[in-house]
Amino acid sequence: MAELAVDDLAGIDVVSEACLSPDGRLVACSVVRLDPERDREIAELSFLPADEGETPPRVAPVSGRSPRWSPDGGAVAFVDSEGAETRVYLVEMPAGRPRELVSFAGGTGPAAWSRDGARIAFSAAPVPGGARRIAVVELETGAARVVPGDDGDDDTAPTWSPDGALAFARAPLRPPATGPRSEILVWRSGDATGPRPLPTGLAFAACPSWSPDGDQLACVGTLGPRLGLQDPCLQPWVVPRGGGSARLVAAEGIAGVIVAAAPEGPIWSADGKRIFFRAASAGRIDAVEVEIEEATAPRVLTDGGQLGSLSSSADGTRLAFVASGLDSPSGAFLYEEGSGTRRLGDAPGGDRGLPRLAPRRFPSPHGGELDGWLQGVGSGPAPQPLLVAMHGGPHNFVGPGGQLGHFHRSVLAARGWIVLTLNSSGSGSYGEGFADSIRGRWGEGDLPEYLAAVDRLVEEGLADPDRLAVAGYSYGGYLAAWTVCHTDRFRAAVVGAPIVDVESFRLSSDIGAWYVPWEMAGGPVPDPDRPARLSPLTYAAEISTPTLILHGDADRRCPVGQGEALRDRIAAAGRARVELVRYPGADHLFYARGRPRQRLDYNRRIVEWVERMTLGGEEAKKGGDGAVAAEAAAR
């Protein structure tokens, strides 16, 4: 297998969206690549024929994202960003020049076309980082209006009914301590009373979409307060146009789990009898359909991989989507009723020679088995060095799809390492009970599962017990820190944007006020000592593993003070080498969406650290002449 380098990440084109034209003949894609020289991410529109032999329109290279077709297929609206500002453009088909419609200082979501094609609605922020409002643009005049709202409300996911009513989701910008709340509102132009709430009976309702006749709305949400759009157990609901108790659909057969087709909601069939959506099960994300009036399990339409954006032709017989698979970071695909799924032949983002992911099940010390994935088996002589890569959330999940944000995994796998990922307790895509099983058991419930998987790989002669490393980001960073607090068997640790002190996280994180009470709840009685007991900082003086901490200094989700506290505690104890790298201006998702140079630096430092500390001999493990507390500011 050819050796990969971190810089190869910049040569991979990723299809981020695939939007199908109403007639089902063309797919408008957004293809993203990194430009390290200019330190920016570039997104270009690309048009692919859905049928072999068809010729796509000749459109000059256009920078843009989130393409959305007009109802008649005669135009595509898209957005393009420069800094915090986002501009909305319209390009006439088959080969027109883009013209700017409107710009927003704080960014905008994709276009939502009215059924008559005369208006477009957006979820837009008037200022960077501020609450979003629904803006409506009249295409004939260019006039823009903003749907009334309060500064404390965040409005998203607009959708038009056949008769011109606009529905959208509204949530408090700062959720209450009981957890995120969201409701659906309906607004008509000229209504002096403003938008009106649509009663649903749901504690959280988002991503609405109108039925073809306008008599019903589909949405995603939860009956009781949980984790909002971050919840691993969102479900599909249908509610009458005038409001009333929402009716759950697709409750059985796929663990009741839905991944919202964000930012739009479930897709209706042309006859209004079915809805399509993205559902997660056992690490996979597939397109499924469900009959609205039938109590049947969802029918899975796609096979394998992790499906991203989803769109439909006007008659509902074709679906376009992007997906990543076991050996491919991304691609554009078409599903056609009666003939199944096929990859669009000239789509970028195909096999880039990345080490293949292999599914594997591991016995759990709590009983049953857990899904895992191995990358790099056989890329070097056995037993191989092993990187244990821990996912975030804790309710995120891994599956048969590449994660280019964590490109270091592929690089190490190509260099002779095995990389293990695992859907441990708390992971999404296995139902509500499994997702909630980690509440009040952070570290205590999932670390034994990871260690048992490591033991199995060592017993089988695949992994070298003397060359083990652990890495994670966000909650994965928490768990990596927890790991080296409780065992010294790993020779290197990488802790990205961690939570290390649960109580200070509660007070400083943008979600801490409601997230910590939810996650720390568990067991029959409250335990006031649980936050301290489950904080890695409580045990960090025991760490003897060389530890690299990576953190964006503008991270509001897991503030950089968490990483600093861990660095200080390890350094004070003097038992391990420790280094903190701060990324200026970087937010929580910089490793996947931030500046290209920072993303490359992040992956490069991980590869260099785990190889140097794991393969560098006993002196690397001990930290040389003692602990080294270093701090660097990456470019």
Image: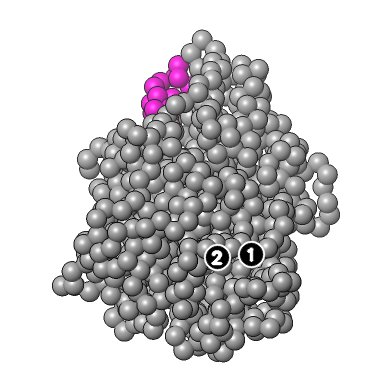
Q: Is residue 297 above or below residue 151?
A: below
**Residue 530 at x, y = what percent?**
77, 43
**Closer to us: 577 or 556:** 556
Q: For the residues labelled 2 and 1, say whether their Cβ atoms are less than 8 Å apart.
A: yes
Q: Residues within 10 Å of mark 2 (few under 14, many from 20)?
A: many
* Magenta stretch: helix, strand or loop mostly: helix
Question: What span is in magenta?
Answer: 608-622
The amino acid type found where label 1 is placed reads: Val
Q: Which quadrant is home to the N terminus? A: top left
The answer to whether residue 490 is visible is: no
Q: Is residue 610 magenta?
A: yes
For residue 524, what is the image quadrant? bottom right
Residue 484 location, quadrant: top right
Q: Position of 319 compared to 295: left or right?
A: left
Classify residue 436 by image quadrant: bottom right
**Residue depicted at x 71% and y 38%:** 508
Looking at the image, residue 114 lies above or below residue 328: below
Q: Which residue is mark 2?
A: 136
> Residue 255 at x, y = what percent?
56, 71
Q: Position of residue 233 (x, y in %)?
A: 61, 65
Q: Which structural element holds mark 1? A: loop
Q: Amino acid at mark 2?
A: Val
Give the left or right position of residue 272, taking residue 566 as reference.
Answer: left
Label 1: how many Cα within 10 Å (few below 14, some 14–19, many 20+):
some
Q: Nearer the viewer, residue 493 or 93?
A: 93
User: Does dot 2 land on a helix, a strand or a loop?
Assistant: strand
Give the residue displayed 32% in from the left and 76% down from the top: 24
Q: Position of residue 20 (x, y in %)?
A: 35, 71
Q: Quadrant of the C terminus?
A: top left
Residue under pointer 1:
147
